Image (cartoon, grey):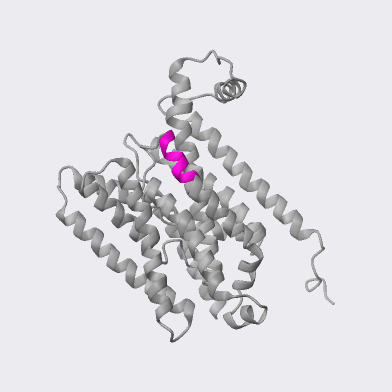
Amino acid sequence: MSEAAAPAPAGTGAVRFVSGLGLATLLLLAGIMLAFSVGRFPVSLADLGLALWSRLVGQPSGLAPAAEAVIFNIRGPRVIAAILCGAALAVAGAAFQGLFRNPLVSPDILGASSGAALGAVIGIYFSLGIFGIQSLAFAGGLLAVALVYLIGSAVRSGDAVLVLVLTGVVIGSLLGAGVGLMKYLADPYNQLPAMTFWLLGSLSGTDRSDLLPLFGPVLAGTLVLFALRWRMNVMSLPEEEARSLGLATGRLRIAIVAAATLVTAASVAAAGVIGWVGLIVPHLARFIVGPDFGRLIPTAAIMGGGYLLLIDTLARSAAQVEIPLGILTAVIGTPFFIWLLVNARKSWT
């Protein structure tokens, strides 16, 4: 046997996972430190550590009240929300890419983002508060995917995965038309700018009250996907092979779609429509730790949180006005997508 064909040492996978997880953690820690240090009111790492330690032990920190307000009421909730949203989109993207066996799939493939967007613009149109807008966005994302799955399940002919994807494209297009209609009917001076800003993605209005509705669904959906990690490895095989190994592919597909949709809808409800994170980060994590979902899911979650946190820091500090997150992720994601297409084309020939 040649040296090139020799099997890898038994511990190579574990070393690769530990190294990849460490790299993702460093990215996250760097994002946290940069997020607190950059801004109109910069917070030094020493002040941040002192404030966190004082809050932990229940003693006064000695910092100025303005510094504590920035850490705990303004920048802190935004940092946590960015980490949760990035982790949610990355985990959902990894799950959908494995489920549909397609490297170009993103979390909005089944219409979750379109449904959440329609729910949000309806809430803005009827001048609801932030809680009402986020609730309609969350419900809209879940209902959109439920509708896609019901229609896809009713179509018995052809490949089940292909039918589900095509149904998601059709329903997503219909929901996008609904978003366009609501924007056309909206007040152009008040409601339309709010709709446009929300649809481009932003964490500027995040406060502590937004964290619990975001944390619960993201944690629950991620834990479900991690619990199904070895079954998701099998689901990456062709349908017939997965069934021959004893998996109930229909029920398992519903569980994976439901969990991935839950985290996607929660993220879109909290931060608006943010593209590319669920496409780019799973590929980077897969390149570092491999395709095994037991290693891919935690690595993608940590890396996604750090990535979106860095993007959010850039969005609020690169210009005099805050840049929407969707614009920055598209600017960074487009070159990566082109690179991905080129390499996919090479693998076809």
For the stretch drawn in magenta, the main secondary structure is helix
Q: Is residue 259 left or right of residue 234?
A: left
Q: Is residue 267 above or below residue 44?
A: below
Q: Residue at x 44, y 25 (%)?
A: 70
x and y percent of residue 340 in the render?
Answer: 50, 66
Instruction: Identify which residue, 146 or 208, lies in the foreground.
Output: 146
Which residue appears at 54% of the width and 61% of the height? Answer: 94
Q: How far across and down, in percent of the image, does residue 81 sit?
A: 46, 41
Residue 279 appears in view: no
Extreme residue toward the top, this view? 62
Quadrant showing the C terminus? bottom right
Q: Position of residue 282 (x, y in %)?
A: 55, 59
Q: Residue at x 44, y 44 (%)?
A: 213
Within the magenta stretch, is there residue 47?
no
* Relative horizontal placement of residue 242, taking residue 147 as reference (left or right): right
**Residue range of the region highlighted in magenta in the rendering:** 208-215
Q: From the viewer's side, name the closer residue of 246 and 84.
A: 246
Question: Most extreme residue toward the bottom, as rendered?
Answer: 157
